[in-house]
Amino acid sequence: MADLRNEFRLDPSLPILVGDDVFLRGIRLGIDQAEYIYKSGELVMGKGDPYAEIRIDEQSLIYTMAYAREHAIWPHPAPKTEAPGTTSTGTEPPPGTYPTSTPETPPGAREPETFRAEDALRAALVAVVEKARRAKAKGFARLTVRPFEPGDTLRLLNAMNTIANARKTVTLDISFEAADGSTTEVRFEGTPGEAMPLKDFIEPQLRAAADKQLDANYRIDFDPPLSLEGDAATKLIERLTRFATGAAEVVAFAGDK
């Protein structure tokens, strides 16, 4: 949240912030419109939840709705129901609170190990590869990239199209306001190839827009898993950073070859 607030203040197209009221109202509006999920410690707040204090600190995070759903942060897990004839253990959460733990992994199944980094795209990719190698992971079954720089949001489409032996998907949430005040909102979910006609249409609109918002999440499922031995990971990094260089969040999921 603190980093997001600082980015908001650095954007020359936005009003100067004397305090945090405008920023916090924007966060609450995003929550009310089911665009954002707020998480601070054990608290997870989304649309329809009772209002809670929004803190601006390193432990408080804002997620897009698409990211929160993909990573089981939202919606709240359904409360467990007791079988008939059983008694309460006295450990149920008090009314008005919501459990934030994810459902237990089924017996015999094992959650894939994940490696996460936020930095300039190349640095973040290198970091997750190094973390995975230190953890003795053999390869990556999946990789997700969430760019923070608006300019990289669409440029990454070109890079994704160069990756072979993988299933690639992208989610784009784009909104912009034209000089005459008219507004456009676009949501796309599909393959990078299918998104290219949209990219060609939307780029000139965004350049002329008075205001714009772009959010994207790229996902690569490797089949077979991308080996961390040899130069396969290095080649992937080169492809992904050929057109995009800004800050991004990268999450890698371990997988055996």
Image: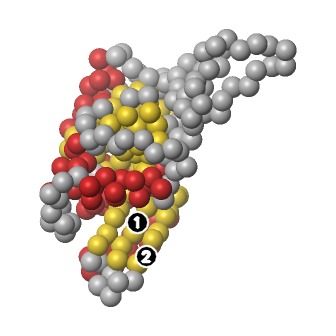
Residue 44 placement (x, y as % from top left)? 46, 37
Residue 27 or residue 93, whichever sits in front: 93
Residue 83's quadrant in the figure? Answer: top right
Question: What's the amino acid at mark 1?
Answer: Ile
Q: Are marks 1 and 2 in contact (CB under 8 Å)?
A: yes
User: Quadrant of residue 102 in the image?
Assistant: top right
- Residue 174 bears which disc, if any? 1
Residue that mark 2 sits on: 184
Q: Give me the residue at 29% from left, 78% from top.
A: 209
Furthest toward the front, the residue is: 95
Q: Amino acid at mark 2?
A: Thr
Mark 1 vs mark 2: which is more N-terminal? 1
Q: Is residue 84 left or right of residue 240?
A: right
Residue 21 percent coordinates (x, y): 26, 55
Q: Residue at x 79, y 13 (%)?
A: 86
- Residue positioned most to the bottom: 180
